[in-house]
Amino acid sequence: MSGVLEKGDGHQDDTLMIVMLWRIDAGDIEGALAIAEYALAHGLLMPAGHTRTTGCEIAEEMAAAAKLADQQRQPLELSLLAQTVTLTDEEDMPDVVRAELYKWVGFCQRDNGLPDAALDTLKRALRLFQGVGVKVEIKKLEKARNTALPKT
């Protein structure tokens, strides 16, 4: 796969796209994101049988990987989720998919001691889709922030 990425001719490669998904499933997120960056830069499409756009597929699969990693108590690195957001931010996808990605970025920010960033990200997820499942966490973060504010 590295040869395909290094050659960089940008031709449609269904095998490469399937390998990207396999890498996400196998936990090789860095490898998957290298392919994702290449795929998006060259406008590669998902192979037959996949109905979503490449950007949407990447965002949705990464959110699912983040959820699974969190359930296994082995959360993904924040930098990898942030890279996913950067790669897919301009891509067309349903709000619910983008909201789910932001949800897991926000949870990861929270877990990495970035409560203000987490609050902003979770609020963005909620604006995109009211049913994303972040309302309780937003309330907790707001309460913690208000408790930490100096009394005047």
Image: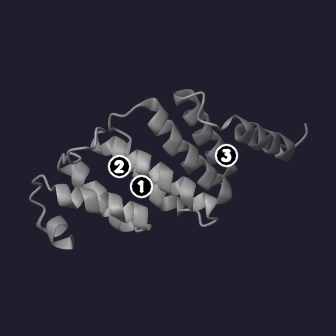
Please give the residue where the numbered disc 3 appears in the rendered image: 116
**Marks 1 and 3 close (CB-CB < 8 Å):** no
The circle on residue 69 is none
What residue is at 63 percent from the left and 46 percent from the top?
A: 118
Q: Which callout, 2 or 3, points to the residue nearer the camera? A: 2
**Residue 106 x %, y %:** 60, 47
Q: Which of 65 and 109 is in front in this view?
A: 65
The N terminus lies in quadrant: bottom left
For the residue carrying disc 1, how many other residues have a C-alpha within 10 Å: few (<14), some (14-19), or many (20+)?
Answer: some
Mark 1 and mark 3: Cα distance apart in space: 19 Å
Three-letter code for the amino acid on which mark 2 is drawn: Leu
The circle on residue 83 is 1
Q: Is residue 56 above or below residue 27?
A: above
Please give the residue where the numbered disc 2 appears in the rendered image: 87
**Residue 91 x %, y %:** 32, 38
Whichever of callouts 1 and 3 sits on the residue coming sooner in the sequence is 1
What residue is at 19 percent from the left and 60 percent from the top?
A: 15
Q: What element carries label 3?
A: helix
Q: In this view, does 122 lie to the left or right of 15?
A: right
Mark 1 and mark 2: Cα distance apart in space: 6 Å
Q: In this view, does 70 lie to the left or right of 102?
A: right
What residue is at 48 percent from the left and 33 percent from the top?
A: 96
Three-letter code for the amino acid on which mark 1 is drawn: Gln
**Marks 1 and 2 close (CB-CB < 8 Å):** yes
Q: Which residue lies furthest to the front in this view?
A: 49
**Residue 39 x %, y %:** 23, 53
What residue is at 36 percent from the left and 49 percent from the top?
A: 58
